[in-house]
Image (cartoon, rainbow, N blue to C red):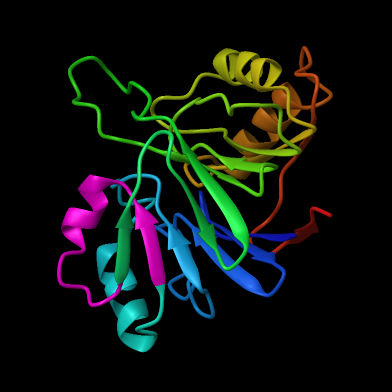
Amino acid sequence: MRLTKLGHACVRIEHQGTTVVIDPGAFTEADATRGADAVLITHEHMDHFAEDRLRAAVEADPGLRIWTNRAVAAQLEGIGAQVAVVGEGDAFDIDGLGVSVHGEWHAVIHPDIPRVGNIGFLLDGRLFHPGDALTVPPHPVDTLLLPIAGPWTKVSELIDYVREAGPGRALAIHEAVLSDIGQMVHGRLLGEGGPGTGAAFAQLTAGEQLDLG
């Protein structure tokens, strides 16, 4: 399994000839879905879901398959592609790659701001993308994609989340709202310069790849 970090919360996963892209939103390269067999979308916020880009991707490749929650699927009505609605507890297969779904709600930004649905995706039982929530996967995973910065995040909560989830490593995502200095500060606190999470921590640049074994 190979992971390519794309912009912000988006990653590309290649596994035994299948390519899956998760959360290609407006802060991600416009061609993030090129060559993908499937797209997974955790929730409807624009930094995770860009409707116009996804419609263009399906027009270019009508065989593209999409799995997401009900709110996103409703916005894709008439897209002319296979759109499957999934939620907490569901499981499905993408050309031999097993995926299970965990979580229901976006993290609280403020009590006055209505919450939207949010689902996390666990791929092959070892890579977890939580979307915009601190959903603990059903078991410790090899790789946890960790949203490090947003209007709902707090470093102390991120540290405790990684400790509770117990992954082998955490990879930073959702960092587009941070300056270079902000990314360095967060990296130190979540990595060796902080109080410790029990997991190795890494920050990949856009386009950088990592072999997950």
In the image, 131: left or right of 206? left
In the image, 113: left or right of 86? left
| Quadrant in which residue 88 is drawn | top left
Seen at 50% across and 26% down, the residue is 135
Queried whether the magenta region covers residue 78, the answer comes back as yes
> Measured along the vertical axis of the image, is residue 18 above or below residue 94?
below
Residue 157 in the image, given as x and y percentages of width and height = 56, 15
> Measured along the vertical axis of the image, is residue 191 above or below residue 195?
below
Which residue is farthest bottom?
60
Residue 204 in the image, given as x and y percentages of width and height = 71, 51
Please identify the quadrant where the N terminus is shown. Answer: bottom right
Q: Which residues are magenta?
A: 65-81
Seen at 67% across and 29% down, the residue is 185
Seen at 29% across and 74% down, the residue is 81
Residue 146 in the image, given as x and y percentages of width and height = 60, 35
Queried whether the magenta region covers residue 205, the answer comes back as no
Q: How many marks?
A: 0
Seen at 34% across and 84% down, the residue is 62
In the image, 14: left or right of 85? right
> Measured along the vertical axis of the image, is residue 10 above or below residue 31?
above
> Measured along the vertical axis of the image, is residue 152 above or below residue 144?
above
| Quadrant in which residue 179 is drawn | top right
Please identify the quadrant where the C terminus is shown. Answer: bottom right
